[in-house]
Amino acid sequence: MSVWAVLAAAGRGERLGRLPDSAAGQSPAARANPDRPKAFVQLRGRPLLAESLERLEGSGWIDAIVVVAPPDWEEPVILLAEELGCGKVVAAVAGGASRAESVRIGVREVAEDAAVILVHDAARPLVSDEVIERLLAALNDGSDGAIPGLPLADTVKRVRDGAVVETLARDELTAVQTPQAFVASVLRDAVASGREATDCSALVELRGGIVRVVEGDARLLKVTTAADLALVESWLDADA
Ligand code: CTP
Ligand code: MG
């Protein structure tokens, strides 16, 4: 059974903005370069992408990796993969205008005989083998997809024009992360719809697919703001 990873790294990182000078690592000027897409901002002196790429490469569960790169950054992605000795990287392709489009482009590069496709956000650097193992176990139990989720700490309300419309039952809510794993044929069909969604599971759900939720990991935090980047960096520093 071959498992392919599609690493979505084509986003611009608009919300990351300029990084604080106090951030550790490279010179502040280099880190704060506004022309640098999020996958190439520095995390402990390396491009953010390096962390997830190296972890997927090192996973015994993953056979091949497709990186969806920011447009015009395919070459630096290939060079980074070579530098890190990531021999599982078979393609670096330019992404599209949205995450869904980028995933669609990446999935096209996956071999016909792949059994499972695992889609991961490069913006979540701390992917672990434990999570991947839980996802694949859930797929083996017969679901179309498996995704990591965590319970919410906050109460969530539906709000319209600044007024509360409804309070949602928190015990039914789950915050969902990546990596997300799918039976390859199911994901191919789902992305072919051309619809937009903020995760792949939503596209599979729309087609009636059965998606199981496994235990997620707080360390799979998505780096959105400069504060998130500093937090992930502090976790890595503590581990070092
Ligand atoms: N992504 C992508 N292609 C896009 C947009 C996003 O591959 N056109 C990827 C990002 O690289 C990221 C993941 O999808 O790994 C989640 O997106 P997000 O955290 O929103 O990253 P950005 O879109 O880069 O950030 P922002 O929304 O702040 O610009
Ligand atoms: Mg985005």
Image (spheres, rainbow, N blue to C red):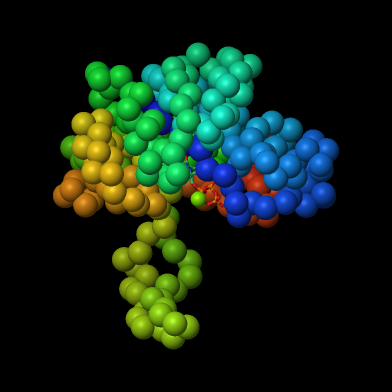
Residue 3 in sight: no
User: Could you tell whether 210 is left or right of 160 in the image?
Assistant: left
Q: Is residue 174 left or right of residue 27?
A: left
| Closer to the camera in the image, 57 or 105 | 105
- Residue 189: x and y in percent read 21, 37
The answer to whether residue 198 is seen in the rendering is yes
Of residues 230 and 150, which is closer to you in this image? Answer: 230
At 61% from the left and 24% from the top, the residue drawn is: 76
Compare residues 145 and 98 and report the one nearer the observer: 98
Identify the residue at image location x=33%, y=45%: 200
User: Residue 24 in the image: x percent, y percent?
Assistant: 79, 42
Count of labels in the image: 0
Classify 123 as above or below 65.
Answer: below
Asked if residue 61 is positioned above or below residue 240 in the image, the reply reads above
Outermost residue on the bottom side: it is 163
- Which image quadrant: the N terminus? top left
Identify the residue at horizontal 38%, vertical 37% (top origin).
103
State the image quarter where residue 73 is shown: top right
Res 234 quadrant in image: top right
Image vertical order of residue 169 relative to residue 216, above or below = below
Image quarter in which the C terminus is found: top right
Q: Is residue 223 left or right of residue 177?
A: right
Q: Where residue 128 sits in the image (x, y, percent)? A: 49, 35
Is the residue 29 above or below the residue 7 in the image? below
| Residue 151: quarter of image | bottom left
